[in-house]
Amino acid sequence: MNLPGAAGGARDTGAGDAADAELDAALALANGRAVGRHDPAQPPSGGGGPDGAASSLPRPHGGARGGIHGAARGASHGSPHSGRHDLPWPRARHIAGSAAGPLGRLALPLDAALGHALAEPLTALTDLPSFDTSAMDGWAVAGPGPWRTEGSVLAGQRSTTALLDGHATVIATGAALPPGATAVLRREHGRISADGLLHATRGGPGPGQDVRPRGQECRGGDELLVAGVLVTPAVLGLAAAAGYDELAVTARPSVEILVLGDELLDAGAPGAGRVRDALGPLLPGWLTALGAGTVSARRLKDDAGLLQDAVTASTADLVVTTGGTAGGPVDFVHPVLERIGARLLVDGVAVRPGHPMLLAELPGGGRLVGLPGNPLAAVSGVLTLAVPLLRALAGRPAPVAYEARLTGDVHGHPTDTRLVPVVLDEESQAAPLHFSGPAMLRGIATADGMAVVPPGGAVKGDRTAVLETGWGRL
């Protein structure tokens, strides 16, 4: 299945409904909504995707094996590594999102719960508001006016004396209405006459006017938020208003980043065959925004023994490597995973940039995402594999894909999905950015997201799914 408007061939102008259905399916796959939680070996139930995903997914445990235990199989794209078979992009995302369940539950005080996901629904502990409340500064009145005024009620106070008919009391916003009050007269709508009586200047207030009645927002026991909702500042405010001192949340996964490459510089200008490490600065903060908890990063030389020691010694829920996933002379990720008995769930993805990415289950139960070494290819790998996996581990929603119309043509790969940096205009149209090569970050640095471009490409006016990067929340 292609997104509507893939370049090549005449368009069927009568196929609008089918095109809409295809785009909806592509958005669902991009958002991880196409199927429920399944074992990573099980296929998406709807089949299809923006790059022609079939409805059957070979089981990691079944069939002939490649060089690494249980590698999921797809169409071969002539990988330099003979065991790698690139999976269609939506199938790879589905596997990543199904490769783990949420981590353990924590009970955290409100000031420590920010950025976690709710591990259980948030229910109201009491009615909100828990008493009839004045919505304005003015007077609480009983019956029709004019009224004889007496006393006052401020926020935080509660009068136990009933307000008699024809009487009023000064009241502040948020204060509890005294018994017998029928409405609130706003301060700007009342005046005190010479005889000391309160008169309404715009007609008397109707029953309940400018009163927030008890239970207006919710009743005790109502479900306010479902499990899985990200704890934002607004959620903390709601929880506090509802009477919570702590929240049951899902633990955030720990991540260890292993940056590979002898050619990398940690400081100074690139030159003389050396390049600056861009992924060491790029990944830690981004992975934190995507749901990771503790994130550590370190450099490793191109040495298979050092890499094996680092992977086997790691206690992180997720290990992320950069580089070393292709078939070059110092690409040691595949041999190391084979040597330690890792189970490869994804071994290459039919997406550009970034196709030599991988996802493995480590013998100790952790997961490893192998990103390509080129910076934009690594960004593609994060959005394809790390985002769904982190969402699953942290029990939180992934950044949501949405649709937008392209403002220009986008060249496509003949068989692979392309992820292209785009910027959105005021009409929510997606403008493809230049500098979108695998080694380039100039385009993505100003992008609002990555457009999902089907094999064959897309033309101006086509609708496409757009993946949010998530770093807008940093």
Image: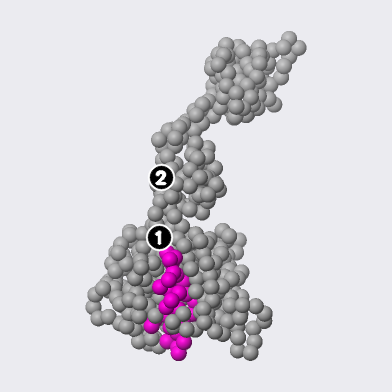
**Which quarter of the figure is the C terminus placed in?**
bottom right
Residue at 60% x, 11% y is 166
- The answer to whether residue 248 of the structure is visible from this angle is yes
Q: Which amino acid type is marked by label 1?
A: Ala
Q: Secondary structure at mark 2?
A: loop
Q: Position of residue 100 (x, y in %)?
A: 36, 63
Judge left or right: residue 456 versus residue 58: right
Residue at 49% x, 74% y is 258
Residue at 52% x, 82% y is 301
Q: Between marks 2 and 1, how big is the CA–CA gap?
A: 17 Å
Q: Position of residue 351 (x, y in %)?
A: 43, 77
Locate residue 397: give its quadrant. bottom left
Q: Is residue 324 magenta?
A: yes
Judge left or right: residue 143 versus residue 342: right
Residue at 60% x, 83% y is 275
The mark that comes first in sequence, 2 or 1, is: 2
Number of numbered tags placed on the structure image: 2
Q: Position of residue 131 (x, y in %)?
A: 51, 26
Mark 2 neighbour class, 10 Å CA radius: few under 14, some 14 to 19, many 20 or more? some
- Image mark for residue 392: 1
Between 42 and 7, the one nearer to me in the picture: 42
Q: Compared to 15, does 261 lie above or below?
A: below
Disc 2: which residue: 121
The residue range painted magenta reads 307-335
